Image (cartoon, rainbow, N blue to C red):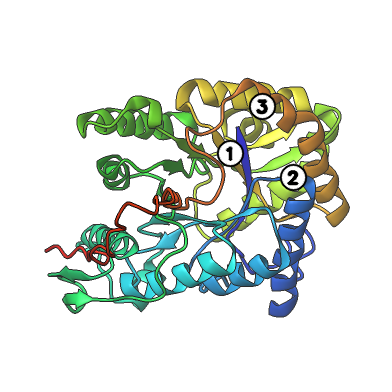
Amino acid sequence: MRFLAITLIAHTPHPVTGVRKPTGERFREVIENALLAEELGFDGFGVGERHERPFISSSPPVVLSHLAALTSRIRLFTAVTTLSLLDPVRAYEDYATLDHLSGGRLELIVGKGNGTAQRDLFRVTVDDQWDRNAESYELFRRIWREDKVSAKTRFRPELDRAEVWPRPLQQPVRVWHGSATSRESVDLAARYGDPLFSANVTNPIEPYAELIRHYRERWEHYGHDPARIAVGAGTAGFYAARTSQEAVAAYRPTFEASLAQQRRQGLNPVFTTLEDFVERSSALIGSPQQIIEKVHRYHEQFGHTVLHLHADAGGLTGRQHRDSLTLFQSDVAPVLRREIPDPPFPWAPVLAAPAPAAAPAAASVPVPGPGPGPVSVTAR
């Protein structure tokens, strides 16, 4: 099993103290958390994309490029790239550049995105958002694979043998599809044989498990090998301590502050007590053994091989956050890595195999001249 730390870069007051950090300090906190994730041995670090209050994650390529310069091993994820809002040509340019700068450590999680305000900002409607998402992904995917692209499009100017630079490093970049509540994203992932990442945050396990079952059904419907399926899943919260009593006591102020905030916003919380949250949500709060057992319960339903934890401390102190993640890597991750398989692909840059070297020709054998140059693929 592989493990990511992910942040949406929410810029909100501290849930317990009510103090909000300056913007620059919040970004520095993201950088520190990414460096901590690499230091502790996490396999990936993800940055979300939102274009509305209270998030300041509107430019993940910039943030991830900075992190690429400061890290050397950890893979860099988007969580998620909101393709329904973006021009796929411009998105390709940003991420192909980032992929080169990171040495092929980029992985994308793409999705429609959430939020009325950001949809209004980009003039995307409820009626066309899924069509935009599918068209943007299909064009993005082709640009990554084809040297010249022609395409008739609805939501951006058409392309006619367009060349988009730089050409990619990873051939191709791995793209996961974020899934929260709808079958459209699940079907898109299955259609192209791409891995799925379940949000798995707001509700109990059942609706997410149903979507993952649908993904597996559609995967086989499109003729893909079931052995190549890869599923990732999120968590609603995390805090590990030596005993469950210690973990629950430490996490209670964070939960109660979050509950009060939801009610102030007029929301109806799904989990109204910490005990229910710990029991029925995807939150991993407890001793190492409790966390291992809960991940296994979810794995029985999801078959997931990648798990994400929150990169941010939230209402925890910096020391609590670091100690909790350290305990996860020392006592939880090794067991889960041993007992749950990795995804069915190498956790490494997706690079084209080098062409085999030609055998030296004997002196008496004529050497053929150069063959034709590379063929550009153009399709409508």
> Can residue 87 be spotted in the picture?
no
**Eye-nearest disc, 3 or 2:** 2
Q: Earlier in the sequence, mark 1 or mark 3?
A: 1
Label 3 element class: helix
The residue where tag 2 is placed is 41
Q: Marks 3 and 2, how far apart in space?
A: 14 Å
Residue 336 - label: 3
Q: Earlier in the sequence, mark 3 or mark 2?
A: 2
Q: Nearer the viewer, residue 354 or 8?
A: 354
Tally the numbered discs.
3
The residue where tag 1 is placed is 307
Question: Disc 3 residue type?
Answer: Leu
Quadrant where the N terminus lies? Answer: top right
Q: Residue furthest front?
A: 364
Residue 358 - label: none
Residue depicted at 61% across the width and 65% down the height = 10
Residue depicted at 35% across the width and 34% down the height = 211
Q: Nearer the viewer, residue 113 or 59?
A: 59
Question: Disc 1 residue type?
Answer: Leu
Residue 372 coordinates in the image, percent (x, y): 23, 65
Q: Marks 1 and 2, how far apart in space?
A: 14 Å
Label 2 element class: loop
